[in-house]
Image (spheres, grey):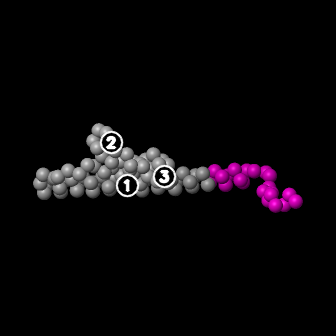
Amino acid sequence: MANLEVICPGCDATLVVDSVSGEVLLKKLKPTQPKSFESIISQLATEKSEAAKRFDQGIESQKDRSRILDERFKEALDRADKSDTPFRNPMDYD
């Protein structure tokens, strides 16, 4: 699917939104001229910390996803073990 680009009317930032999940993938701020070298360094530090935070969130969501899939698999195995009816292949009904 294609991503959508939406312009925020409040801050004129461009938001890249996933069309399937509706999650904001990227926020592009309107370019501005930094006033000094120190402001550039502080801006880069902020962006670095935000990127690290997003990365950690992605890792945590993958850990949770793996755990949830494992639980669902174990539940399906338990249901299959408790079932009394044997599996019948649909091709055997001929």
Decide if residue 18 is on the left or right side of residue 89. Answer: left
Which-is-in-front pick, marks 2 and 3? Answer: 2
- Secondary element at tag 3: helix
Quarter of the image for the C terminus: give it: bottom right
Please, what is the three-letter code of the amino acid marked with disc 2?
Cys
Compare marks 2 and 3 and give the one earlier in the sequence. 2
Q: CA distance from mark 1 to mark 3?
A: 12 Å
Residue that appears at 38% across and 49% down: 5
Tell me the chief SS of the magenta region: helix
Which residue in the rendered view is the most extreme toward the top?
A: 10
Residue that appears at 72% across and 54% down: 81
Residue that appears at 16% across and 52% down: 34
Number of residues whose C-alpha sits closer than 10 Å to that of mark 1, classed few (under 14), some (14–19) or many (20 or more): few
Which residue in the rendered view is the most extreme toward the right?
A: 94
Q: Nearer the viewer, residue 11 or 54?
A: 11
Residue that appears at 49% across and 49% down: 20
Residue located beneath label 1 in the image: 56
Does 64 sit above or below residue 92? above
Q: Which residues are magenta?
A: 74-94
Where in the figure is residue 65, as x and y percent of width and height? Answer: 51, 53
- Secondary element at tag 1: helix
Residue located beneath label 2 in the image: 8
Which-is-in-front pick, marks 1 and 2? Answer: 2
Residue located beneath label 3 in the image: 64
Quadrant of res 47: bottom left
Q: Is residue 81 a member of the stretch shown in magenta?
A: yes
Which residue in the rendered view is the most extreme toward the left?
A: 36
Where in the figure is residue 17, as x and y percent of width and height? Answer: 41, 48
Compare marks 1 and 2 and give the one earlier in the sequence. 2
